[in-house]
Amino acid sequence: MTDQASVREVGLRDGLQLVRTILPSVDKIDWCRRQAAAGFAEIEVTSFVPPSIIPQFADAAETLAGARRIDGLLASVLVPNLKGAMLALDGGARKITFVLSASEEHNLANVRRTTDQSIEIFRSVVAERAARGLRDDVTIAGVVATSFGCSIQGDVPERRVFQVAQHLLEAGADELNIADTVGYGNPAQVQRILSEICRSAGPVPVAAHFHDTRGMGLANVTAALEAGVRRFDASLGGLGGCPFAPGASGNIATEDCVYLLEDLGIDTGIDLDRLLEVRRRLEDWLPGERLEGRLLNAGLARTFKPARSR
């Protein structure tokens, strides 16, 4: 059987959080609809954060409601605290990704709490789901940001990454997402850390989230594959980045990541031609914004064959 992997689009959340253009809700939902039609089973559609901090997500409830109406799409949302999680649950979210940082200094800068305090809030989010009787209806993923280094703190001890991941597992995480938030990771480090995370996670799925700040993103994807990871975040056109990573060029480009996986013979279920149509549309939605990625300009290689056609 063909090996399989899933790619989750995070451009509507991670990608849009730093752009100057406020994309209307109707365009966000259109984006979701087009990528779902290209074969995406999950898209992170928004974040429940105060609009005063990120005005882009003032329409979080509206965007989630529209995305939930798209057949076959799991519309996930990101939250940094209990209030955001409660708003997401009120809005009918079926997957919540709760973010905290292995770097103490990054967590303090990002959410004004220590990492241990965020872990306790994660426990409260899991408890809130149970109190609402939604244990079987809502997935909660724990995102360990700055797992490979931090632009504020510098080195992040691997033992701390493992410790935070273990706390999230014990608290009831349904998925772990290990993130290179500021683009510090290298393939050897990625393979070492993710191999241990996958081992300790057991049946709990492990996803990887890479930024391409220093051109290491796709190399890190291949290292994660070798470690056993089969779930990846990516952002169309390489949009996004961390506000605490000066010079960040954003996430790995979705179109490039899908091409890599398919070219390796790993089935993503995504139609690359239709995905590139959405990528072209992105330039109309976000005129003047910096977009990355190589595949749109280079096109598919003459020798390329989708994994499922081999």
Image (tube, rainbow, N blue to C red):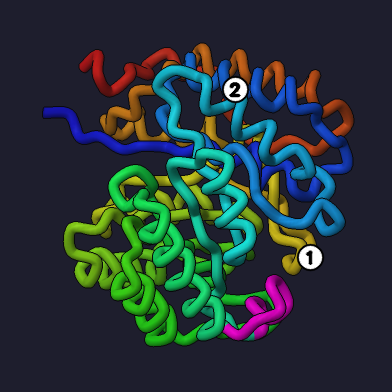
Q: Which residues are magenta?
A: 105-114
The C terminus: image quadrant: top left
Percent from the top left, x then y, of residue 84?
A: 63, 57
User: Which residue does the image show at 37% across and 17% down from the upper left?
Assistant: 303
Helix, strand or loop at label 1? It is loop
The amino acid type, in three-letter code, at marker 1 is Pro
Q: Residue at (48%, 51%) from the top-left corner?
A: 96
Q: CA distance from mark 2 to mark 1?
A: 28 Å
Residue at image position (57%, 55%) is 86
User: Which quarter of the figure is the N terminus placed in?
Assistant: top left
Quarter-wise, where is residue 159 in the image?
Answer: bottom left
> With respect to residue 191, does 105 lie above or below?
below
Asked if one can make out residue 178 in the rendered structure from this viewpoint, the answer is no
- Mark 2 vs 1, N-terminal side: 1
Q: Which residue is mark 1?
A: 246
According to the picture, the residue beneath numbered tag 2 turns out to be 298
Judge the density around disc 2: few (<14), some (14-19), many (≥20) Cα neighbours within 10 Å.
Answer: few
In this rendering, the label closer to the viewer, 2 or 1:
1
Q: Which of 280 and 173 lies nearest the eye of the viewer?
A: 173
Amino acid of disc 2: Ala
Mark 1 nearby-residue class (10 Å; few <14, some 14–19, many ≥20): few
Label placed on residue 197: none
Is 275 left, or right, of 110 in this rendering?
Answer: left
Determine if residue 10 is in view.
yes
107 in the magenta segment: yes
Q: Which SS does the magenta portion mostly show?
A: helix
- In the rendered image of this protein, does residue 118 appear above or below residue 294? below
Residues under numbered marks 2 and 1 in contact, where contact means CB atoms less than 8 Å apart: no
